[in-house]
């Protein structure tokens, strides 16, 4: 059965939450790795100036000759930027701190919200044959994040299982609604994934219950547990699926990838 939400070409997903420390980059890296394990060809586009997704996939700073800064602001060709990670069919467009000034530099450009959209629709994209493009956004509703959501078909929201988790989510939902009205009418919410959950903890369980009551089917069935292996893996510059393939964290990201591949009815913001 074909997926009615599946676009032609790669499915572009912005991994976004303006709150920091919610497992956004961890989710981009490990979901990408899990999809690659399932035979999909995946590109992670790192537009966070901290460059953690690039570091987490073993791309050393000195190897980042051309970055997403050049892709977005200088119309650099994808072939100059995309780097193959050690994990087979998982690729990354890396970033550096150069991207810190991007918001200021984009303001004067009349197409400022569409720069990444256009960059990811270069004819060269077809040559790579990507199935998925995951955009790792900075922890802010900045022009970079707006660019990601204008470029994307959908938004995946990591939500940490902690007090105040749902606070701020309404602002993200509002931004998605506004973008659907002004810049990207087809933008959808891919789903909300609960991260760093400890089901032995009453607070974690309460946050999960609240999220499911408030957001319903938008919340993925898969919950990413708080797992020391997930936390350790970036320091070894690899996804947890390679660092400890049998860990609870690795199994959870595999389950999330499988769930994402299930056909589903489109859901609006």
Image (cartoon, grey):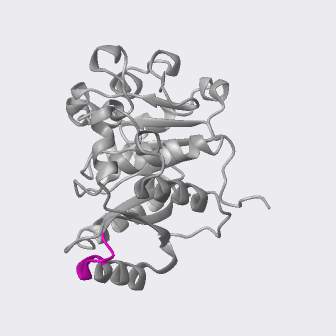
Position of residue 13 in the picture relative to residue 7 (left or right): left
Q: Which residues are magenta?
A: 198-204
Report the residue at 43% width, 36% height from top. Answer: 45
Report the residue at 24% width, 51% height from top. Answer: 140
Image quadrant assignment for residue 39: top right
Residue 63 to residue 173: above or below: above
What quarter of the picture does the N terminus occupy? bottom right
Does residue 19 belong to the magenta stretch? no
**Where does the image place residue 155, in percent across and percent down from the top left?**
45, 56
Asked whether 9 or 39 is in front, the reply is 39
Asked whether 18 or 207 is in front, the reply is 207
Q: Is residue 64 visible?
A: yes
Does residue 202 belong to the magenta stretch? yes
Report the residue at 25% width, 34% height from top. Answer: 49
Report the residue at 38% width, 20% height from top. Answer: 74
**Where does the image place residue 116, in percent across and percent down from the top left?**
43, 36
Position of residue 90 in the picture relative to residue 113 (left or right): right
Position of residue 49 in the picture relative to residue 132 (left or right): left
**Where does the image place residue 7, in percent across and percent down from the top left?**
66, 50
Asked whether 257 or 198 is in front, the reply is 198
């Amino acid at each position: 059965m074909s997926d009615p939400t599946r676009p032609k070409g790669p499915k572009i997903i912005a991994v976004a939450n303006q709150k920091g420390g919610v497992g956004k980059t961890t989710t981009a890296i490990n979901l990408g790795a899990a999809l690659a394990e399932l035979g999909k060809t995946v590109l992670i586009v790192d537009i966070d100036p901290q460059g953690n997704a690039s570091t987490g996939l073993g791309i050393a700073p000195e190897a980042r000759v051309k970055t997403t800064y050049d892709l977005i602001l200088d119309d650099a060709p994808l072939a100059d930027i995309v780097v193959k990670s050690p994990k087979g069919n998982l690729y990354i467009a890396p970033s550096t701190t150069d991207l810190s000034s991007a918001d200021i530099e984009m303001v004067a450009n009349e197409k400022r919200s569409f720069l990444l959209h256009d960059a990811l629709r270069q004819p060269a994209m077809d040559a790579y044959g990507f199935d998925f493009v995951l955009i790792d956004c900075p922890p802010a509703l900045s022009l970079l994040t707006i660019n990601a959501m204008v470029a994307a078909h959908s938004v995946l929201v990591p939500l940490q299982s902690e007090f105040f988790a749902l606070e701020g989510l309404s602002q993200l939902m509002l931004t998605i609604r506004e973008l659907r009205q002004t810049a990207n009418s087809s933008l959808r919410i891919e789903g909300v994934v609960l991260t760093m959950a400890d089901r032995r903890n009453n607070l974690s369980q309460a946050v999960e219950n609240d999220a499911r009551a408030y957001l319903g089917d938008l919340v993925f069935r898969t919950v990413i547990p708080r797992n020391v292996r997930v936390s350790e893996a970036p320091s070894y510059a690899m996804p947890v699926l390679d660092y400890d393939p049998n860990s609870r964290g690795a199994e959870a990201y595999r389950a999330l990838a499988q769930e994402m591949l299930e056909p589903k009815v489109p859901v609006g913001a």
